[in-house]
Image (cartoon, rainbow, N blue to C red):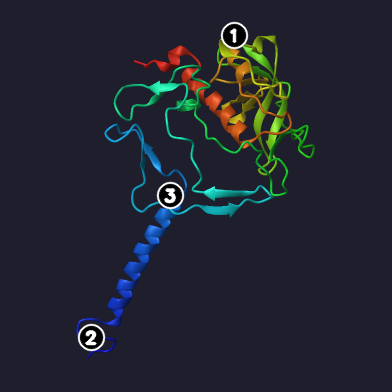
């Protein structure tokens, strides 16, 4: 028999090839199971079987695995329990057919769907590698400063999408890890409020001033103004507040950003209508 032949129909090269195929198939299945640790099982509202059914597919998600979080933050399991299946409060289906999008039935900027949706992240501050809160105002991060040769946004007027001035920038909230501005703290004046009867009272909080995400601010150093095109003046009083005036949690970050994002669609009734 030729060199490397095992039988008249099998040699070492074939065995290596088959072993590689088996290994590669196993690797794909392993990776596919591991990437199902987040977001599975999927939920479907197919009405032929039940109001909601779980869609798992092949292969099935792995058994929960426990991870130790850094800086003494405990442990986390993945896959982790998702929110209970069922209808989302404050919403209804836009149409009767399966898969129809949800539309808000109350205040669209607070119902948490569409552009106002946010992830239910942990309601704890994001931490630096040293274990200190990552996003804080500059009155707390005293080692941060605005470059003397650059314009200082503090004291600039904040202008809403309807052209009304709502207040001034009181402080800057910075990311200690990445050395950048994340939020402007807005000190509202008398015109920056809203109708509590219409929008509802703000939950109790030690933070009196709303935060404006940097990504939603158009800073004009020449005019000494910060313009916001997503929300109106009356909306500023109802921006979700932080529980503390010296730090922000991961959940609060998402809720605040979602509120400003929702204004691009829900800030004015005309924004929900077609252009043509």
State which quadrant residue 30 falls in.
Answer: bottom left
Number of the label disc, if any, that sits on residue 97: none
Above or below, comparing residue 16 to residue 23 in the picture? below
Residue 273 as seen in the image, left or right of residue 250: left
Dots 3 and 1: beta carbons under 8 Å? no
The image position of residue 244, as x and y in percent, is 71, 29
- Distance between the Cα atoms at labels 3 and 1? 45 Å
Is disc 1 placed on a helix, strand or loop?
Answer: helix
- Distance between the Cα atoms at labels 2 and 3? 43 Å
Residue 62 as seen in the image, left or right of residue 124: left
Query: Which residue was labeled with disc 1?
Result: 197
Is disc 2 placed on a helix, strand or loop?
Answer: loop
Number of the label disc, if any, that sits on residue 36: 3
Query: Which residue was labeled with disc 2?
Result: 7
State which quadrant residue 224 falls in.
Answer: top right
Residue 195 seen in the figure: no
């Amino acid at each position: 028999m030729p060199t490397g032949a095992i039988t008249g129909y099998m040699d070492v090269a074939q065995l290596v090839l088959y072993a590689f195929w088996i290994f590669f198939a196993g690797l794909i299945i392993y990776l596919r199971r591991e990437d199902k640790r987040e977001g599975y099982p999927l939920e479907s509202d197919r009405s032929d079987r039940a109001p909601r059914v779980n869609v798992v597919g092949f292969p099935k998600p792995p058994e929960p695995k426990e991870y130790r979080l850094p800086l003494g933050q405990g442990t986390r399991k993945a896959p982790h329990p998702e929110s209970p299946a069922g209808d989302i409060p404050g919403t209804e289906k836009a149409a009767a057919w399966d898969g129809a999008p949800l539309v808000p039935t109350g205040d669209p900027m607070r119902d948490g769907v569409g552009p106002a949706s946010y992830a239910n992240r942990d309601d704890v501050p994001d931490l630096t590698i040293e274990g200190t809160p990552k996003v804080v105002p500059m009155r707390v991060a005293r080692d941060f400063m605005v470059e003397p040769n650059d314009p200082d946004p503090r004291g600039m007027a904040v202008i809403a999408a309807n052209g009304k001035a709502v207040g001034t920038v009181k402080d800057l909230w910075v990311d200690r890890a990445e050395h950048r501005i994340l939020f402007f703290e807005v000190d509202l004046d008398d015109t920056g409020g809203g109708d509590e009867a219409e929008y509802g009272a703000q939950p109790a909080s030690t933070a009196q001033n709303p935060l404006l995400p940097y990504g939603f601010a158009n800073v004009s150093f020449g005019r000494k103004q910060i313009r916001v095109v997503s929300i109106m003046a009356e909306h500023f009083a109802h921006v979700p507040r932080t529980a503390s005036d010296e730090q922000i949690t991961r959940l609060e970050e998402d809720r605040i950003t979602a509120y400003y994002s929702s204004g691009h669609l829900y800030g004015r009734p005309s924004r929900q209508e077609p252009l043509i």
